[in-house]
Amino acid sequence: MADLKVLTVCGAGVGTSTLLRVNVDEAFKSFALPFRVQVINTSMSRAKGTKCDLIITFETFSAEARSFCPSVVVIKNLMDKEELKTKIGAYLKEKKLI
C-alpha cells in the first residue's frame, strides 16, 4: 500500500487542527502499520483542494468535508486519545488495512 494521507481539519487550520494532528499521529503510530501515514493539519478551505485518503474533523465541519472526501472520521474531543484510537481503528478495519 502507498502512504496514507490524513488531514486534520478545523476552521482556520492553526490551533485546533494542530493539536488534533499531534494526537492523530500518535494514534496511528500505536497500530504499527506497515506503511507510512502522513498527517497534515489544515483549514477547511485548504482541505478542499488537497487530495487525501481520510479527514479527521469535528461535527461542525463533517458535512462539508464529506462533500469532497468520502472517508471522514468525526471526533467529539480532540484530547480523548481512546476515542481517536477507537475511531481510527474502525476506519483501518473498514478499509481492510489491519
Image (cartoon, rainbow, N blue to C red):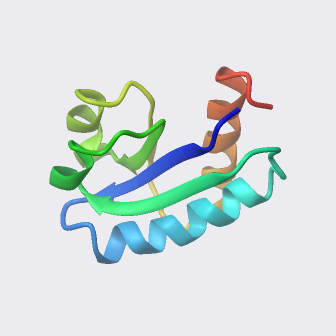
Image location of residue 31, percent across then percent down: 81, 50
Instruction: Compare residues 86 and 14 and report the one nearer the observer.
Output: 14
Residue 31, can we see it? yes
Q: What residue lies at 69% left-to-right and 51% top-to-bottom?
A: 36
Image location of residue 66, percent across then percent down: 30, 29
Horizontal side of residue 90 vs 66, given as left or right: right
Horizontal side of residue 32 vs 47, given as left or right: right
| Quadrant including the N terminus | top right
Which residue ends up furthest to the front in the rendered image? 2
Q: What residue lies at 58% left-to-right and 60% top-to-bottom?
A: 24
Horizontal side of residue 56 vs 45, given as left or right: right
Image location of residue 19, percent across then percent down: 46, 74
Residue 31's place in the image compared with 13, above or below, is above
Q: What residue lies at 47% left-to-right and 66% top-to-bottom?
A: 20
Residue 96's place in the image compared with 3, above or below, is above
Image location of residue 51, percent across then percent down: 36, 39
User: Within the image, what quadrant is residue 86 found in?
Assistant: top right
Residue 80, can we see it? no
Horizontal side of residue 35 vs 61, given as left or right: right
Q: How many labels were placed on the picture?
A: 0
